[in-house]
Amino acid sequence: MFLSQLHLHPESMKISDLPPSYDSNGNVPPQIEVPPLPEGVLLLKVYSGFLQYMYATTRNFICENMPNGSKIWDRLEPKIIIVLCTPNGWDIEQQLFLRNAALKAGI
């Protein structure tokens, strides 16, 4: 998941904050290389699958590890509010993408 976050970053955030290497002329900021996703894998699918996994794992943990966990989950699930935080440098385009991934994940 961590590498897939780089695919969503705006171009302005793909510049490394590391100092230039000793053999460079120092005029060009080093770029972060983003490895390509596997062929046929869409970024939206990666994000929505990850969000589905996190939601299901949270549900299973509560239901299996808390006394009356299933009853508590059933009572509170309709009232759940999910807050998705994004890096300060992300634009509205990336925020909307994340929102769409959450909707696709059904959460």
Image (cartoon, helix red, strand yellow):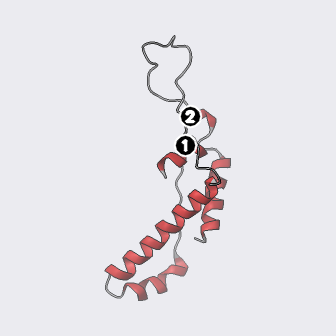
- The x, y position of residue 5, in whole percent, is 53, 47
Question: For numbered disc 2, what is the local secondary structure?
Answer: loop
Residue 68 placement, left or right of 36: left
Q: Residue at x 55, y 63 (%)?
A: 49
Residue tagged 1: 6
Q: Residue at x 50, y 46 (%)?
A: 3
- Up the image or down, 106 lies above or below 73; here it is above
Q: Residue at x 53, y 70 (%)?
A: 81
Marks 2 and 1 close (CB-CB < 8 Å): yes
Nearest the eye: 36 or 26: 36
Between disc 2 and disc 1, whose residue precedes? 1
- The x, y position of residue 52, in whole percent, is 53, 68
Q: Which mark is residue 90?
A: none
- Up the image or down, 69 lies above or below 56; here it is below
What amino acid is labelled 1 in the image? Answer: Leu
- CA gap between label 2 and label 1 equals 8 Å
- Up the image or down, 60 lies above or below 1; here it is below
Residue tagged 2: 14
Quadrant placement of the C terminus: bottom right
- The x, y position of residue 25, in whole percent, is 51, 10
Residue 67 placement, left or right of 79: left
Circle 1 residues within 10 Å: few <14, some 14–19, many ≥20: some
